[in-house]
Structure formats: structure tokens, C-alpha cells
Amino acid sequence: MKRVLMQAYVTGSIQAVERYKKAFAAVIVSSYLNENGSYYHCELDIEGEILAVAERQESAVCGNVMQFCLHYGEGNEAKIRRAYETLQDDAQILVPLAPCDFSPLMTDFIDAYGVRWCLFI
């Protein structure tokens, strides 16, 4: 596994990122915007650790604003496919396993136990 990072889904992502930058002397290392100008995905470097922030969407489970993001790195597609295939039963698939803006392979889902996962290369 290449890295594990923290992910928070918030209402007011632009304001939250600015506040986190100030609170933690954080620096934006990558970001992607939604059509409405809020963050689809924004990674902040906080002393070498990543906090990813995204705008909370209506479809998010109320009260569930945390996610485990596992960044496997190139050559580990089989690990992602195995995890996805193992956990997809009774899961709420938010983003099916496919390429996206920041990864050649990515998925986002809430498993049968209520844990939200983002797995990507």
C-alpha cells in the first residue's frame, strides 16, 4: 500500500479548506472542483500527512462524514479489485470501479457495515 489518508466530507468545503490551512499551516497539494466551485477533492499537506476535504453531497449517509482512503500505487490493481469484489455485496456503490480524474482505477462505496471506502491507484 502506498499511503493511507484522512478524508472529511463537509458543507462549505472552500471555507473549511481555508480554515484548515490556517489552523495547521497546511498547503494544498492537489485539488479538483465541482461545477459549483466547491471541492470535489482537495488534499492538504499537514506536516507530511494528508487531509483530504470534499463537499458533502445529498446522497451521503447523514452523520457518516468519514472515509478510509487507501492509495495502493501503480501495479496494485489486483489488490483494489480483490477488495472491491470482496466488499461490494450489500454495499452502496457511490462510484463504480473505473478510471477517474486522479487515478487510472478508483472506487468509492459504503460497505455493508457502514464504512465508507475510497480505493485507488
Image: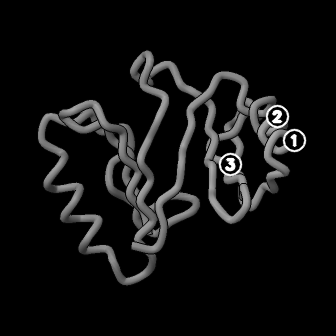
Measured as percent of width and height from the top left, residue 112 is found at 18, 34
Measured as percent of width and height from the top left, residue 61 is found at 39, 21
Question: Which quadrant of the figure contains the N terminus?
Answer: bottom left
Q: Are marks 2 and 1 in contact (CB under 8 Å)?
A: yes
The residue tagged 2 is: 19
Q: Residue type at mark 1?
A: Lys
Q: Residue at x 31, y 37 (%)?
A: 115
Measured as percent of width and height from the top left, residue 100 is found at 50, 58
- Horizontal side, residue 117 vs residue 48: left or right: left
Q: In the rendered view, would you say 71 is above or below 109?
A: below
Q: Dot 2: what SS?
A: helix
Measured as percent of width and height from the top left, residue 78 is found at 24, 74
The label on residue 42 is 3
The label on residue 22 is 1
Q: Dot 1: what SS?
A: helix
Q: Residue at x 62, y 38 (%)?
A: 54
Q: Residue type at mark 3?
A: Cys
Q: CA distance from mark 1 to mark 3?
A: 15 Å
Which comes sooner in the sequence, label 1 or label 3?
1
Q: CA distance from mark 2 to mark 3?
A: 13 Å
The quarter holding residue 79 reads: bottom left
Q: Residue type at mark 2?
A: Arg
Q: CA distance from mark 2 to mark 1?
A: 5 Å
Q: Between residue 46 and residue 57, name the one nearer to us.
A: 46
The quarter holding residue 34 reads: top right
